[in-house]
Amino acid sequence: MLSALNQRHAQLLAILLPAALLGGAYISQYVFGLFPCEMCWWQRYPHFAALALGLISLAVPPRRLWVALAALAIIASGLIGAFHAGVEYDWWDGITACTTPIGEGGGNAMDAIMNAPIIRCDVAPWTLMGISLAGYNFLISTFGGLAILWLLGRKTPA
């Protein structure tokens, strides 16, 4: 039998984790001036969905389903963060225009500079211990989402 306490903890984590990560993203943007690139926005969208799903779980049954969907959305954000971190660390190329190096495509270098995005996806604007914000999103979201799923699947001891 699923422990009501485990389900409650999973539900709280499914609400607090995306709220905290979105709050941190907006604080870094509006207080510290670290404006998001396109891939940063991609990481926020699943957190918006997870927060909505977590809040829905407070009122609409089956609560466990809504919490599990929130956990999957949180993990999706983490996976996008992993991809973004790989682009920042030059492990692979990004798939957006905000990662196009200047001078690529054989055009005029001045045109490339003038048309380059203001916030580039392939440059980490901030790191802590060599890990970018996208890298931290990967770590926190992936392990947080897995913890929620673990709590939902955990049975009470007999």
Image (tube, rainbow, N blue to C red):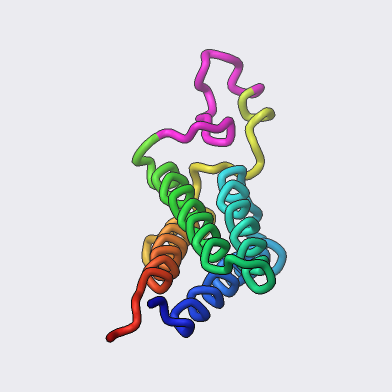
Measuring 52% from the left and 13% from the top, which residue is drawn there?
Answer: 106
Is-magenta flag for residue 146?
no
- Taking the image as shown, residue 150 lies to the left or right of residue 98, namely left
- Taking the image as shown, residue 130 lies to the left or right of residue 94, namely left
Residue 146 x, y percent position in the rendering: 39, 64
- Residue in front for this viewpoint, 98 or 155: 155
Query: In the rendered view of the protein, which quadrant contains the C terminus?
Result: bottom left
On the image, which quarter does residue 153 sit in?
Answer: bottom left
Is-magenta flag for residue 103?
yes
Measuring 46% from the left and 56% from the top, which residue is drawn there?
Answer: 75
Res 128 visible? no
Query: In the rendered view of the protein, which quadrant contains the N terminus?
Result: bottom left
On the image, which quarter does residue 110 sit in?
Answer: top right
- Taking the image as shown, residue 138 lies to the left or right of residue 20, namely left
Measuring 54% from the left and 43% from the top, which residue is drawn there?
Answer: 121
Measuring 41% from the left and 50% from the top, which residue is drawn there?
Answer: 82
Res 151 visible? yes
Residue 42 x, y percent position in the rendering: 59, 46
Residue 101 x, y percent position in the rendering: 50, 30
Q: Which residues are magenta?
A: 93-111
The image shows residue 128, relative to residue 113, as above or below, that is: below
Q: Chief secondary structure of the magenta span?
A: loop
The image shows residue 6, relative to residue 19, as above or below, that is: below
- Residue in front for this viewpoint, 67 or 75: 67
On the image, which quarter does residue 58 sit in?
Answer: bottom right
The image shows residue 18, relative to residue 39, as above or below, that is: below
Residue 23 x, y percent position in the rendering: 64, 69
The image shows residue 111, relative to residue 85, as above or below, that is: above
